Amino acid sequence: AIVCRRPPPPSSMRRWESAGAPASEPADAPLTAGEWARVPSEWFAARRDILRGYAARFDLASITMKAIACLLTVYSVYLLYCESCKDEYYAFARALIAALSDATFAQRGSVSAAALVLAASVWLLTVLWMRRRPEVLLVDFKTYRHASVGGDPRNTAGEPVAYDRFLAESRAARHLDGGECFTAKSLQFQEKILRTSSISERSLFPPSIFREEVGQDAVLAERDSLCMRGAREEAECMMFNAVEQLLEATHVAPHEVSILVVNCSLFCPTPSLSAMLVNHFKMRSDCLTYNLGGMGCSAGGISIDLARRLLRGHEQKGSLALVVSTENITQNWYRGNDRGMLLQNTLFRCGAAAILLSNRGSDAGRARFKLLHTVRTHVGKDDLAYNSVIQEEDADGIRGVRLSKAIMQIAGDALKRNITALGPLVLPLKEQLKFFFNMVARTAARGKAGKPVKSLARSLVPLPLFRSLVNFTPDPADQPLPSPKPAARAAGKLSPPRPRPEKPEDPLLKALPPYVPDFTAAFEWICVHTGGRAVIDAMEKNLALPSHYLEPSRLSLYRYGNVSSASIWYELELIAENGNQCGAHRPDGNLPAVPRKLRRGDRVWQIAFGSGFKCNSVVWQCMRGS
């Protein structure tokens, strides 16, 4: 914990007189490397670091309890020692054995047995109380929203870009050799996707991509704007503002934060983004920092899960955790002509979210949400799923993120696995029983449990008593038609039978689809990652949700675009502000019959998909209504 402190590096160092600087030179002239090396070192030890070292070695509470236990044991031996009291000891032992026997064989009327059972109950309750894990509370959260769309007046970074400006910038884009970045077909493809993306013209792009004038940097854009410096500026503008406004709203000083988790998939500089925040906000030296990269749009849920595991550990009692979710598109603005990579240009936008979590009981009164569950699903063992979202070079050597055509099917499979694990945690018993009996009936009807069970299942499933229980819904078109009488056909009164379409192999299994639980019975609000209009439509269809249930996701896509891992927080913010009336704030929105706000006790389901391929769910319970 003892370090050597020198003056700051030469780039930010003022010239010291002790280094022999001439008096005529300005006071703020930087030191050379040699002068800085000759400055006398000052050895110091921070009080916090010293205490942290001793605390890691000695647990004062544990040592105190062990010492008290030893003293009590010695004192009890002292009290019991008596040469003339052996008969009393034997009587006490016999009474204890009798009480244990009465308790074992449930002898009613035995006071000693009741006292023994009561003492055991008190001991068990004490152990359970000591082993309990602290609740993880969401104190507050903030997203970076531009001042023009209702954000903080200080949020002026970023450029709301109209479609025509987007296309004009794409036409003017040039490589370092002067060649055009996009062909005419690529421009037409981008325009088609852009105008059907359901993203408004007020969503944000970083200023490194869209300068003051169209084609301002021309051939120098890749060198001067779409570079590491431009990416750092984008990250700082988004993250710093979101974190600063969160700390202001919660009245938390940066040195109070014990855990910092930052996730950004495509931008992983050195020093890391977490180090960038520590440096800017001057956080304390023992803050645990984590920087998650390459985990895609589902990394927001992974960061929450990581913070939850840390906050529930015994070493982090009374701690605050800061989670920051963002994405960076400056260096990942694809400037080629591969259609699988051009999608990212038209869908992704810049943004960030900052979330403050706590395990302190004193924060229960001001916390907005309580964390109930996190469920993570990773299907990366399948090669098709692993390669569905991948960063690589195209045929011309231009780097971009390729999206597979099979991504919707892969996301559907990951979703099924995720909700299968999530269902028992959140669904009402009625929905769980329907899901269970449907699964048993489908397994038995396929013959996986043997032929006798298959025959029994196929005879019981169509009965009215079991239909609703196993979700059996026969299609009338699959029912056999009555055969006409031979005499009527022979007399020519009936036309010759038309060839019937080929039936599926097993009509019973067709009428017995997998049961989709009613998730509206488990959650009042659902936030689906805004991966695009097709993703939201597929989620609404596969989960059989009412048309207004995913309006927060649609409104978030419309206003902010796909802001990657931060999107689920933009949606939750819209829910807190508008309730179920989000559809009124976008064209062709859907509204429910009865307006409703976010209330205390409501459950919120955040679900996101990411590269790898992953599907992650986070479940919250509202503690303060809007």
Image (cartoon, grey):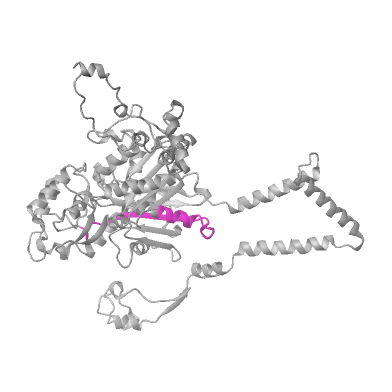
Which residue is pictured at 55% across the width and 67% down the height?
Answer: 55
Using the image as rendered, state which of residue 434 and residue 121 is in the foreground: 434
What stretch of residues is rendered in magenta?
303-332
Check the picture and name the quadrant holding the C terminus. top left
Q: Position of residue 290 (x, y in %)?
A: 39, 62
Residue 573 appearing in the image: yes
Residue 318 among magenta residues: yes
Q: Quadrant of residue 504?
A: top left
- Does residue 513 appear left or right of residue 47 in this picture? left
Using the image as rendered, state which of residue 373 and residue 381 is in the foreground: 381
Q: Position of residue 115 (x, y in %)?
A: 77, 46
231 shown above or below 609: below
Residue 175 among magenta residues: no
Which residue is pictured at 41% across the width and 59% down the height?
Answer: 260
- Does residue 103 appear left or right of residue 158 in this picture? right
Q: Position of residue 277 (x, y in %)?
A: 35, 61
